[in-house]
Image: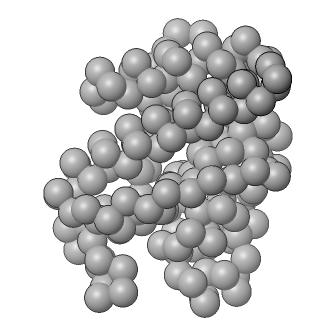
């Protein structure tokens, strides 16, 4: 885990801790890297409730309650599945916010429609979910590191936005 992940995690901690909010993760291709970055900060047990590594469609469906129809029609590597993973994590983990990642990290597994390096990221609350798609293929390790840092950065920006709206 890089320094950037730790810095972002510390900033996320400040927002969640100050607001008494909770966080969980639902990860597929990142395999727990997002959760690892979050718990790297001492005191994370005050707001991080846990993470689900849903590496297969079966676990996405049975644990996170991702729709079988969505998985069939859109595939696991889609914006729709990432959104459903956030909703599922919020429900199953009973958290205010969740972060999700699903994609094809590589080196194999890509298709013409979903090439290697395609990773859908989702984050937010059950009622306000944002998404982003990463499409660059720079090798498995770099793809996963970039996805982790990217979603942490986007989630931090989201929290800052939420905080400024509450202050108005």
Is 22 situated above or below 107? above
Question: Is 91 placed left or right of 117 in the picture?
Answer: right
Question: Is 127 placed left or right of 145 in the picture?
Answer: right
**Which of the 4 image quarters holds residue 149?**
top left
Q: Is residue 33 visible?
A: no
Between residue 163 and residue 140, name the one nearer to us. 163
Is 47 situated above or below 75? above
- Please name the residue shown 22% across and 56% down the image: 140
- Please name the residue shown 50% across and 16% down the image: 10
Where is residue 82? Give x, y as percent.
59, 63
**Which of the 4 image quarters holds residue 118?**
bottom left
Question: Is 9 placed left or right of 150 in the picture?
Answer: right
Between residue 138 and residue 93, name the one nearer to us. 138
Image quadrant where one finds the C terminus = top right
- Please name the residue shown 60% across and 90% down the image: 73
Question: Is 109 placed left or right of 13 in the picture?
Answer: left
- Please name the residue shown 22% across and 48% down the image: 142
Where is residue 156? Give x, y as percent.
55, 31
- How many marks the image carries: the answer is 0
The colour style of the image is one colour
Is 120 situated above or below 46? below
Q: Is residue 11 visible?
A: yes
Image quadrant where one finds the N terminus = top left
Where is residue 75? Give x, y as percent.
53, 81
Where is residue 136? Give x, y as percent.
25, 62
């Amino acid at each position: 885990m890089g320094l950037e992940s730790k810095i972002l995690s510390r900033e996320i901690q400040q927002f969640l801790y100050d607001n008494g909010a909770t966080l969980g993760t639902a990860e597929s291709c990142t395999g727990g890297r997002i959760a690892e970055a979050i718990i790297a900060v001492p005191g994370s047990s005050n707001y991080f409730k846990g993470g689900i590594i849903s590496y297969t469609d079966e676990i996405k469906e049975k644990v996170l309650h991702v729709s079988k129809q969505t998985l069939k029609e859109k595939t696991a590597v889609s914006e729709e599945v990432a959104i459903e993973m956030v909703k599922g994590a919020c429900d199953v983990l009973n958290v205010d916010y969740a972060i999700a990642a699903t994609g094809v990290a590589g080196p194999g597994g890509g298709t013409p429609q979903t090439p290697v390096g395609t990773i859908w990221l989702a984050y937010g609350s059950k009622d306000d979910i944002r998404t982003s798609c990463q499409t660059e293929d720079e090798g498995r390790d770099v793809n996963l590191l970039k996805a982790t840092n990217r979603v942490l950065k986007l989630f931090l920006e989201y929290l800052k936005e939420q905080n400024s709206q509450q202050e108005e």
